[in-house]
Amino acid sequence: MRLKDKVAVVTGAGAGIGRAIALLFSEEGATVVVVEVLEDRGLETVSLIKEKGNRGLFIKTDVLDLNDIQRAVSQTVKEFGRIDILVNNAGVLQYLPFVQVTEKDWDRIIDINLKGSFFFAQAVAKEMIRAQRGGKIINMSSIASEVAIEFQSHYMASKGGVRMLTKGMALELAPYGINVNAVAPGTIETEMTRQDLEDPTIREEAIEAIPLGRIGIPLDVARAALFLATEESDYITGEMIFVEGGYVIR
């Protein structure tokens, strides 16, 4: 029960990594606010939380809408009185050659992955500063912030931005006792990647590139996020944990 009595907000918690984080946090004692734009997925995550006797709340939120973001933060505080943890997980991935990326493609990736993370963190940080209890903010970056990946130039730009946003936030929020860190997943089997990984050739190539010899699962990422959400990481800020089986050490 490492998160007993904590209130955690997890964006994009309707599936994959976000759902795994929401479920693990709830098992560790946190009240989890599931922020998700797809209502059926968000409600399903909350149902899974409550099945185990834990507390959860779904708030339908589009991270591209600043009014939606503020409403989600205000509703969380009204319902539970505080926000101790934010996991900025909402994001999208698109494979597209650099020369084919349109302005619409660019805006969608940057707006969801970077702009949404920026303004959700800003809204939560203001509440944490007001409450004077400190807090933990965890951003979701990617190995694409460290290494070049073909057909992901705009995605790489968004996740590289998240990495540097994490450092800037950490510096400015440290005086308020707010730790800001990031998690950088590698190849993780989720709804977002499953279609590609069903191709035997792609799966084999992916595994060969990973020193630990397997594709990651959402729980691998959730465990790293849990560490950053607990008091065990109280003296860590502005850092990024790679969860990728050793891919980036080659």
Image (tube, rainbow, N blue to C red):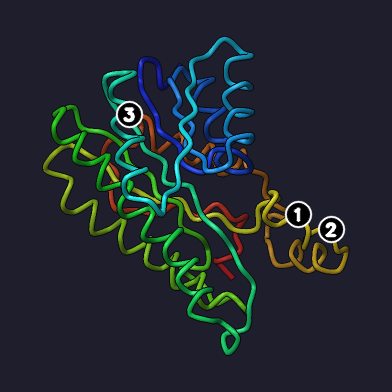
Mark 3 residue crowding within 10 angstroms, few (<14) / some (14–19) / many (20+): few
Q: Is residue 97 above or below residue 116?
A: below
Under circle 1, the secondary element is: helix
Amino acid tagged 1: Arg
Report the residue at 49% width, 32% height from top: 34
Above or below for 79 versus 21: above
Residue at label 1?
194
Tell me if 179 is positioned left or right of 221 in this view: left
Residue of label 2: 198
Is 66 or 154 nearer to us in this picture? 66
Q: Secondary structure at mark 3?
A: helix
Residue at left 15%, top 52%? 172
Image quarter of the C terminus: bottom right
The 10 Å Cα crowd at callout 1, few under 14, some 14 to 19, many 20 or more, is few
Q: Are marks 2 and 1 in contact (CB under 8 Å)?
A: yes
What separation in Å lies between label 2 and label 1 (alpha carbons)? Answer: 6 Å
Residue 57 falls left or right of residue 206? left
Task: Give, as a three-letter code, the residue at label 3.
Answer: Glu
**Residue type for callout 2:** Glu
Q: Nearer the viewer, residue 217 or 93?
A: 93
**Percent x, y for residue 241?**
45, 52
Q: Which residue is mark 3?
A: 231
Which mark is first along the chain, 1 or 3? 1
Distance of label 3 from label 1 (alpha carbons): 34 Å
Q: Comparing marks 3 and 1, which lies closer to the viewer?
A: 1
* Vertical arrangement, residue 84 with respect to residue 37, above or below: above
Q: Position of residue 162 (x, y in %)?
A: 38, 61
Of all residues, the one furthest to the bottom in this rendering is 99
- In primary-sequence order, the first of circles 2 and 3 is 2
The mark tally for this picture is 3
Give me the residue at 82% from left, 64% from top: 204
Question: What is the CA distance from the residue labelled 2 to the residue labelled 3?
Answer: 39 Å
